Image (cartoon, rainbow, N blue to C red):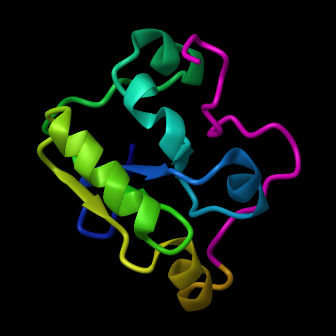
Amino acid sequence: MQKIDSGEMIMLIDVRESTEFNAGYIPGALNIPRGVLEFKIGSDAFWEAAMLYKPFKEDQIIVYCKKGKRSILAAESLQKLGYSNVRYLIGGWKKWELTYPSQYEKNLDQNPHNAEADVGGC
C-alpha cells in the first residue's frame, strides 16, 4: 500500500508479465500478472510470501498494464470477486512512462515487489 498525493492509501498492481515489469514499473507497484491475479489476490500464502497485507474488499486498488486492455479485464475480475473500490490506469504503463519519464524504476535483480512467488496455483 502507498499513499497518493491526496493522502489516500492505495494498492497499485501491475498486471503485466514479470519480464515487462522488470523492464520498468511505477514506484510502489506490486507485480501480479493478469493470468494469475484471480488466484493470488485472495491467497493468504501469496500475501505472506510477498510480506504484504492482503487487501480488504473495500481498499482502493489501482491496476495497470502496458496500454490499458489487460487492466480493464483485471479491474472487472476484481470487481466480480467483490473488491468494490477498483480502478484502472487509463493509458497504462506507456502513458505513465511518457508523462513521468524520470519517475519509474527498473529492476535488473530480484525485486521484492515482484510477487510472482511460487505459492501454489497452476
Where residue 74 sits in the image (x, y, percent)? 36, 50
> Relative to the observer, which residue lies in front, 26 or 73?
73
Residue at horizontal 18 percent and vertical 44 percent from the top: 79
- Picture layout, residue 32 above or below residue 116: below
Instruction: Determine if the magenta segment contains residue 121.
Output: yes
- Picture layout, residue 70 above or below residue 55: below
Residue at horizontal 13 percent and vertical 38 percent from the top: 58
* Rendering quarter of residue 77: top left
* Rendering quarter of residue 113: top right
Residue at the front extreme, as displayed: 122
Residue at horizontal 33 percent and vertical 62 percent from the top: 72
Q: Main secondary structure of the magenta part?
A: loop
**Can the viewer see residue 33 in this picture?**
yes
Where residue 2 sits in the image (x, y, percent)? 40, 50
Check the picture and name the quadrant holding the C terminus: top right
Magenta range: 103-122
Name the side, left or right, on which 117 lies relative to 70.
right
Check the picture and name the quadrant holding the N terminus: top left
Where residue 49 sits in the image (x, y, percent)? 58, 16
Residue at the right extreme, as displayed: 108
Residue at horizontal 82 percent and vertical 37 percent from the top: 110
**Can the viewer see residue 61 in this picture?**
no
Where residue 104 sits in the image (x, y, percent)? 65, 70
Instruction: Determine if the magenta segment contains residue 24.
Output: no
Name the side, left or right, on which 35 lies relative to 43.
right
